[in-house]
Each structure stands twice: as C-alpha cells, then as structure tokens.
Image: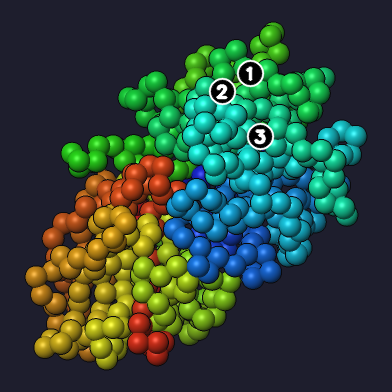
Amino acid sequence: MIRNPILSGFNPDPSFIRVGETYYIATSTFEWYPGVRIYRSTDLANWEFCAAPLDRAGLLDMRGNPDSCGVWAPCLSHADGRFWLVYTDVKRFDGAFKDAHNYITTCETIDGRWGDPVYVNSSGFDPSLFHDRDGRKWFLNMQWNHRGNGTGGNPAHASFDGILLQQWHPARGLVGPVTNIWPGTKRGLTEAPHLFRRGDWYYLTTAEGGTGYGHAVSMARARNICGPYESHPELHLMTAADAPDHPIQRTGHGQYVETPDGEVWHTFLMGRPIPGPAAQGRFCPLGRETGIEHCVWHEDGWLYLEGGSLLARTEVPAKAESRDDRKAVEYDFNAPLHSDFQWLRTPEPSRIFRINDGALTLIGRESLGSWFEQALVARRQQHLRYRAETLVAFDPQTYQQAAGLTTYYNRHKFHALVVTHAPGFGRALSILSCPGDWPDAALSAPLDQPVPVPDGPVHLAVEVDHAQQRFFWRKGEAWHQIGPTLDASVISDEGGRGEHGSFTGSFVGMVAYDITGQGREARFSRFSYAPG
C-alpha cells in the first residue's frame, strides 16, 4: 500500500514527472528559502528530498514579499536532455493586483547548479511548460483579472480569467498569438494548468475551487492544442467538496504521470483536518500536503480515479509499501545546514546564520513580524503530536534582544519561548504569541511575568498535541512547563484570516532578533524533533 500523504507537512502544489525509472515531485515554498523543494522516488511510495533549485539571489530574492507570496506552484519537466523548472515569484497578496512574475530555469541534473532565470511574463501565476512531440514548447498560466465582478470569462470568480496558452522558444521567448483556451468549469478559480498528450488528444488538468475545502482537480481535452476544449463528463477528476467527513480534504492541484509499464498516477494537494476550537472548527495543522492516486482510462477516453469515485484514498494498492516516517531526528550542526531546515525570504543566509564548531549561530536581525530579514531557521511540522528541543546560549542586554524556540506560520501566527532581558529581572524567559488576529498582528505575552534564568546555556522545548501546545525549559536535570497551554490551531492555514488567506504551513525552529540593529548573536548547539 501507498499511504497518503506521500509528502507530509507543508508540501503543496505537486508537479510530477518521470525520467527513466525515477519519479520527481516539485512543491511550492512561498516565502521560505531556498525556493522549490524537489523529491525523488523509484517506487512512488517512498520519497527523499534531492534539490532546492532556487538557491541564490539571481534566481530568487523575496525580501519584502508579503506572507504567503513568493514561489507559487512550480512546474518541473524534462526534455532535450535537461530539467526545466517554471516558477512564479508573487510580490503582492492583498488588493486587486498580484504582480506575479514568471521565470524558467534549466539544469542537466536535478541537483546541479540551475541556470540563470529567463523571464517569461507576468500575466498570471501557476505557469507550466509543455514540450510537444514536434519539439515545440508551449507556456501556460492562468490569467489574473484585477478589474472586478462582471468583467471575467468565468462568472464564478472574475479574477481567474481562464487559461492562457502561447508558444515559447528558448532563444526568442514567447512567440505567436496568445490564446485563452479554457474558462474553467462552474466551480471557478481555475488555475494550475498542466497539459499532456495521449493519442490524438491534448488533455488539460487544472486546479479549481480555491485551495480550501472546495478544491478540485478538473479536466478538459481538445484535438487541437489551442482548443476548443471540452470538459470532463464529471467536470472533475477528484474533489472532496461534497464529502466533509472524508479524512482527506482539499484535494486538487496535481499532475499526471505514466509508469514505464503504462500504469497511470496523479498527484494532488491534500489536507487532513482535525477538530479545532469552537470558533474555528476544523483545521489542518500539517498544512497542504502531497498525495497520489492510481487512475484508469475508460472507454470514453477520459481519466477516472481507480476507486470509482471523486474521493482520494488514504491507502492505495501499489507494488511498494510506504515506510514509517515516525522517527526522531537529532540534528548536528555541521555545514551544510540540514535540508530539513529553511529560512525566510533572503538569498543572503550569511547575514542571518552561520554554522561552526558544531553549532548554529543566529545573528539577531529584524523582528518576528518582518518581511525582509529575519534570523529564523525552522523545519516543517509533519506529525499531529511532536516534541522539539533546543539548547541556546544567549546573553541579551536589552528587552529588544531575544532568542529561542518558536512554532511559526507567519508574522501574525506564532508562539515563541525566548531568552531576553527583562527590566527588573535581568536575563529571563518570556513567551511571545501572535494568535492570528489579522490584520493587526497584535502581540500578547501569555506569562504573568518573566521567569529569571541563571547565566549559561538554557534548554528549551515545545510539545504540540493536535490543537494544544506547551513550552518547557530546564537549567539542570528537571524540565518545567512555562506558561499556559496555548492554542496550536492558530499555527495553521485556517488560523487567522482563514483557509484562503494563508498558504504555507506550520514550522518549528530557532529564532533570534535584535531590533537595536546591533546583530547580537545566539548560539544553538542542538535541535531535535520527535514524533509523539
């Protein structure tokens, strides 16, 4: 059996390809750096991280990008002996405009140094590149319409104004006419186009309904690449919109691949909701994850899920077995930084951290609310229950300096246990919480008063259990809980502004800030993550 998800935790928008006997999936990273995460597998059940291509300023600089902007929905392909990666850098979230810039980069090997990007256009996001049998290449993306209601081609949501297609040439760029090939179904919010060819037909798959609980994979086909396209008899290949009790929700946004022996598989974005606080209802603490389903072709020439419904399964019969991922990890800080960790926005990591003498040293920069330069290094939450621990040495001189352990989603959804300097207390522990009160991002202090700590390194820990979170500390042998039990459900897509307003995921990691501008350093000599 393959157990879904195949990529747990924040791993959305899976672009899926096969090269020989190896399969690859590329996922979105939004404001987390380096941009795009690529995984590989030889059995479709077990995946390993293999590359993060957008790893330098020439390819990606997201300083100043708002939360949940940055790299949206990459498309990975292979042709002409090279890997091709199409990606968007989104510069605006709120308001009528998106300012979504689309680029292409290539590399001969998946884990090599990717070439300087080629700018394509900014018409919309979720671009893809289709390599046709005759050698021509076609660029697709959704068209973003900023003009408002009544102006778009799909009445369900005017901003998503159909799928654009135009020929693209590596030397000459976009050439020939632009064609709006498909407005989408009545579900609307049509995005994430992928083309593939089977026989004499061109098949188009898209994501529709938004990335929340109305999400779907929709399908259309045409004899001519420019259309006209007819919709699938069921409109959608998969969706859980009408099955709120199904364990897999938010299914949509994936890609089609055939195995060497002709089997057919399709990846998809998914979420696993659990009950949350009464005011919020269900939430997905592990964010938008990646699943996979086995598909079949019917005599009508359309693709269907093997299970016979529109619902993706938690377990899919296969030739391989998914391995258990419930293993504790103890990270040693020897260069390079372990690939589980990422940071925010900046292509200049040397300004926010360095690794030396078996420790990760964070250089205190801007606050937890900054969109520019934060010293925050974290890994994904991948389990409903987990415990993370770290050991930090930090000598703050003012309350404007702090370093410690954080559970983090974005600037208005986090909890942090930090070592700081408190007037009247000296060096002390404090908790900072931002409980999802967007747009104000009001900061709260759950501790009645700071807790003084003696000089020297301090052990910090956090335990998350579904919708509850607790911090701990020790200076010696015994652990002590500090502060109240906190609401972990705010550290999710659904927290704060809701499922359509936040697109990244829950992280846990190490943070340091120094808003005096002096760059005071904090030394983290260990970090561990253990599923519960």
Q: Residue at x 36, y 70 (%)?
A: 368
Secondary structure under badge 1?
strand
Q: Which mark is residue 163?
A: 3
Q: Residue under label 2, please give it.
A: 185
Looking at the picture, which amino acid does disc 1 mark?
A: Ser
**Place of residue 53 in the rendered image (x, y in percent of width and height, measured from the top left):** 66, 60
Question: Position of 150 compared to 523: left or right?
Answer: right
Q: Mark 3, residues whose alpha carbon is within 10 Å: few (<14), some, or many (≥20)?
A: many
Marks 2 and 1: in contact by CB < 8 Å?
A: yes
**Place of residue 517 in the rendered image (x, y in percent of width and height, measured from the top left):** 40, 87
The residue lying toward the viewer, choosing from 332 and 159, is: 159
- Image: 469 above or below 478: above
Q: Residue at x 51, y 45 (%)?
A: 12
As measured in the structure, the alpha-carbon distance from the residue carrying label 1 to the one carrying label 3 is 13 Å
Looking at the picture, which amino acid does disc 3 mark?
A: Ile
Question: Position of 69 compared to 521: left or right?
Answer: right
Looking at the picture, which amino acid does disc 2 mark?
A: Thr
**What colouring method underlies this structural image?**
rainbow
The residue lying toward the viewer, choosing from 428 and 18, is: 428
Question: Position of 16 compared to 12: left or right?
Answer: right
Q: Mark 1 or mark 2: name the one nearer the start of the chain.
A: 2
Q: Residue under label 1, please give it.
A: 231
The residue lying toward the viewer, choosing from 195 and 1, is: 195
Q: Mark 3 or mark 2: name the one nearer the start of the chain.
A: 3
